[in-house]
């Protein structure tokens, strides 16, 4: 009997959920993904205060150093150069804030299903590991658009198409609304677009929905978190997702290894950003701090204990191809077809199921039931 009880409890612990595939797609509403645009090159050099530099500083060395700061993604090769004597003394965050371009100098005209809208009203600033990016339909931006666009797609509206005119070299990425651009993101969802180029990006989506009872299970049983279930140590963004958890992991390991984080790290550590010495430290440890490895692996990299989001859909990049003879440079992001199937996470064993199973086993072996137990409690503790 003890073995049966142990088996029932183990089954409850390890097999609480299951996945189904739904195909009743006629009434589904599908939401367009978030699209983030991050500047790749170019700076407002006219805003640079040259009076802060020594007359011995070489202009090419200054520009090389500042470019490394503006678009830092793990390495700062110019931090070891000796042709800029003033560079190590600069306020890095102030320089970056001044010289990175604002939204209106990166994005031109935007359209949703051929209806024009103000780009910078909907592509909102988002702090990322690449610096300030501008994100469309993101749940992680500090502010949200005052006027909502209807981004739902169904059998009545058809698939959605987002058109964006790009005025600079950018890194464009589409992702789940609760996700953010981050260093280790899959390259299938990223396209680096040079100024003047035009690309059409087609994708499909496999959505994931949850049984209403899923939220009642603890995280360790369902092995996922909802966006609002923010763990106490998550400081880099306001909502949980797999990507925000990884960014937090990066930040904590920057502190552990180099006692500072780079100046693009979101929100986490604004009082302890790296100086030039710290950036050199991060550059020297790039194989560790910018890489992930599986738990137990002996390879260099970080072992980040991050569970996926409970609501994160699975996107598939169908095609990315360049368009020629276009009047403006930019990107067209479009869902190729509406989904005809989706995953559903369901509860197969909850606490009530465990009680019923244990009661049934007890009745089988000793003739007892939950009613018997209640009667005994009543006789010994109430009636007597």
Image (cartoon, rainbow, N blue to C red):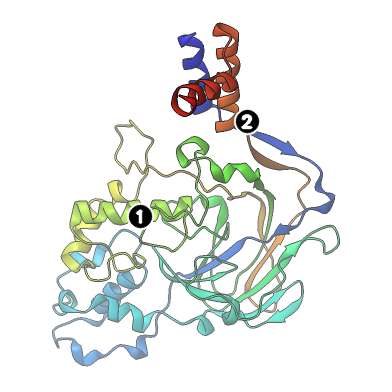
Identify the residue under disc 2.
Answer: 348
**Residue 302 sits in quarter:** top left
Callout 2: SS: loop
Disc 1: CA contacts within 10 A as few (<14), some (14-19) or many (>=20): few
Q: Is residue 6 above or below residue 106?
A: above
Residue toward you, 279 or 226: 226
For the point 26% across and 73% down, the residue is 65
Is the C terminus in the top left, top right, bottom left or bottom right quadrant? top left
Position in image of residue 251 (x %, y %): 30, 57
Relative placement, left or right, of 302 versus 366 is left
Callout 1: SS: loop
Confirm or deny contact between disc 1 and disc 2 (CB under 8 A). no
For the point 50% across and 22% down, the residue is 379
Relative placement, left or right, of 72 versus 20 is left
Q: Is residue 14 visible?
A: no
Disc 2: CA contacts within 10 A as few (<14), some (14-19) or many (>=20): some
Position in image of residue 95 (x %, y %): 29, 80
Question: What numbered label is drawn on residue 232?
Answer: 1
Q: Is residue 91 visible?
A: yes
Q: Is residue 276 above or below residue 381?
A: below
**Mark with earlier residue (1, 2):** 1
Residue toward you, 101 or 321: 101
Residue toward you, 117 or 383: 383
**Residue 118 sits in quarter:** bottom right
Relative placement, left or right, of 76 versus 294 is left
Question: What numbered label is drawn on residue 4?
Answer: none
Relative placement, left or right, of 304 versus 329 is left
Q: Residue furthest bottom?
A: 51
Q: Is residue 367 above or below residue 355?
A: above
Position in image of residue 366 (x %, y %): 54, 7
């Amino acid at each position: 009997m003890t073995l049966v009880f142990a088996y029932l409890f183990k089954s409850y612990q390890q097999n609480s959920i299951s996945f189904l595939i739904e195909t009743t797609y006629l009434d589904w509403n599908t939401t367009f993904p978030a699209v983030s645009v991050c500047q790749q090159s170019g700076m407002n050099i006219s805003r640079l205060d040259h009076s802060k530099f020594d007359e011995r500083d070489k202009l090419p060395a200054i520009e090389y150093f500042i470019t490394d700061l503006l678009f830092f993604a793990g390495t700062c090769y110019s931090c070891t150069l000796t042709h800029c004597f003033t560079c190590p003394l600069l306020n890095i965050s102030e320089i970056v804030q001044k010289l990175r371009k604002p939204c209106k100098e990166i994005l031109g005209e935007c359209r949703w299903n051929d209806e024009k809208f103000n780009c910078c009203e909907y592509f909102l600033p988002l702090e990322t590991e690449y610096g300030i990016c501008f994100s469309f339909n993101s749940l992680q931006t500090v502010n949200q658009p005052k006027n909502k666009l209807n981004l739902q797609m169904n059998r009545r509206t058809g698939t959605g198409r987002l058109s964006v005119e790009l005025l600079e070299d950018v890194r464009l990425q589409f992702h789940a609304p609760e996700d953010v651009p981050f260093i280790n993101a899959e390259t299938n969802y990223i396209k680096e677009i040079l100024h003047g180029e035009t690309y059409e990006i087609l994708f499909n989506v496999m959505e994931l929905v949850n049984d209403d009872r899923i939220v009642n299970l603890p995280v360790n049983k369902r092995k996922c978190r909802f966006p609002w279930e923010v763990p106490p140590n998550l400081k880099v963004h306001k909502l949980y997702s797999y990507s925000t958890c990884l960014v937090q992991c990066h930040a904590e390991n920057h502190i552990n290894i180099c006692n500072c984080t780079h100046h693009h790290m979101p929100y986490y550590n604004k009082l302890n950003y790296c100086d030039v010495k710290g950036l050199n430290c991060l550059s020297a440890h790039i194989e560790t701090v910018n890489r992930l490895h599986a738990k137990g692996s002996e390879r260099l990299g970080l072992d980040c204990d991050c569970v996926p989001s409970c609501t994160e859909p699975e996107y598939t990049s169908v095609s990315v191809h360049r368009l020629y003879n276009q009047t403006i440079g930019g990107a067209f992001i479009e869902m190729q077809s509406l989904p005809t199937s989706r995953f559903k996470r369901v509860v197969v064993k909850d606490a009530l199921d465990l009680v019923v199973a244990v009661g049934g086993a007890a009745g089988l072996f000793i003739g007892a039931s939950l009613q018997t137990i209640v009667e005994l409690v009543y006789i010994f503790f109430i009636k007597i």
